[in-house]
Image (cartoon, coloured by chain):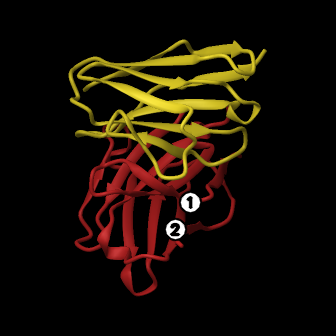
Amino acid sequence: QVQLVQSGAEVKKPGASVKVSCKASGYTFTSYDINWVRQATGQGLEWMGWMNPNSGNTGYAQKFQGRVTMTRNTSISTAYMELSSLRSEDTAVYYCARETRRGYFDYWGQGTLVTVSS
Amino acid sequence: DIQMTQSPSSLSASVGDRVTITCRASQGISNYLAWYQQKPGKVPKLLIYAASTLQSGVPSRFSGSGSGTDFTLTISSLQPEDVATYYCQKYNSALTFGPGTKVDIK
């Protein structure tokens, strides 16, 4: 069965960076784009960007351009999302999600809580 | 950029009621519209894609309709397990979620 398993919770200081991993199993990792979505406590879903695990091509939401980097390691079927210059407003649960060939998300990771606090 | 709005932002209905949630795009998006359900403390779950196609395993009391700019998600008979926030998402170009509609039991 398809699974996306994310790394554990992180606590970071303002100005630092965080790197969240998303390990895929149950399907061919390079066949589906991985997207990242975040959700602040009590707030809605915010799309951050996508990555094609086969080519490494990426596309980022304008809000995160210059601060987010999405990468992958195909040998271990793992996608990564790194967010830099963290501020308190980046405190949120970060999700990875598999994008179907049509564009919507059919499987989600369990989420990773990133807390930014001095 | 195309903006997505949802109405109402929250609603409270009785078990067995018919519930309708509206999602509107600021420009036409054909049928590139999905609906997700997020129960409290849980991961979002895909309910409907292509505006009206039910994802495998989703109860048939859920249905979707619409095309272009106006879309609806209908729960034909609200059940206690349907308490959740529902999000629409456009996926024809830059992905965007609607702000969500919180559904409670009266």
Q: Can residue A43 be seen in this view?
A: no
For label 2, the residue is: A22
**Picture quadrant of residue B58:** top right
Q: In which quarter of the image is the N terminus of chain B?
A: top left
Label 2 and label 1: CA atoms lie apart by: 7 Å
Q: Is residue B39 left or right of residue A55?
A: right
- Pick the front one: B81 or A90: B81
For label 1, the residue is: A109
Q: Position of residue B34 (x, y in %)?
A: 39, 37
Picture residue at 23% right of the left edge, 64% below the top: A57
Q: Which mark is nearer the camera, 2 or 1?
A: 1
On screen, residue A57 above or below A26: above
Helix or strand or loop: what does disc 1 sit on?
loop
Helix or strand or loop: what does disc 2 sit on?
strand
Picture residue at 38% right of the left edge, 75% below the top: A29
- Pick the front one: B77 or A4: B77
Q: Position of residue A23 (x, y in %)?
A: 52, 73
On screen, residue B57 above or below A6: above
Q: Which chain is yellow?
A: B
Q: Where is residue A78 in the image (x, y as percent from the top left)?
A: 46, 75
Question: To which chain does the residue with label 2 belong?
Answer: A
For label 1, count other residues whose C-alpha is less than 10 Å away and answer few (under 14), some (14-19) or many (20+). Answer: many
Three-letter amino acid code at disc 2? Cys
For label 2, count other residues whose C-alpha is less than 10 Å away and answer few (under 14), some (14-19) or many (20+). Answer: many
Task: Identify the colour of chain A in the image.
Answer: red
Picture residue at 22% right of the left edge, 20% below the top: B27
Q: Do the residues labelled 2 and 1 touch (CB within 8 Å)?
A: yes
Q: Where is residue A28 in the image (x, y as percent from the top left)?
A: 37, 78
Q: In this view, does B85 lie to the left or right of B62?
A: right
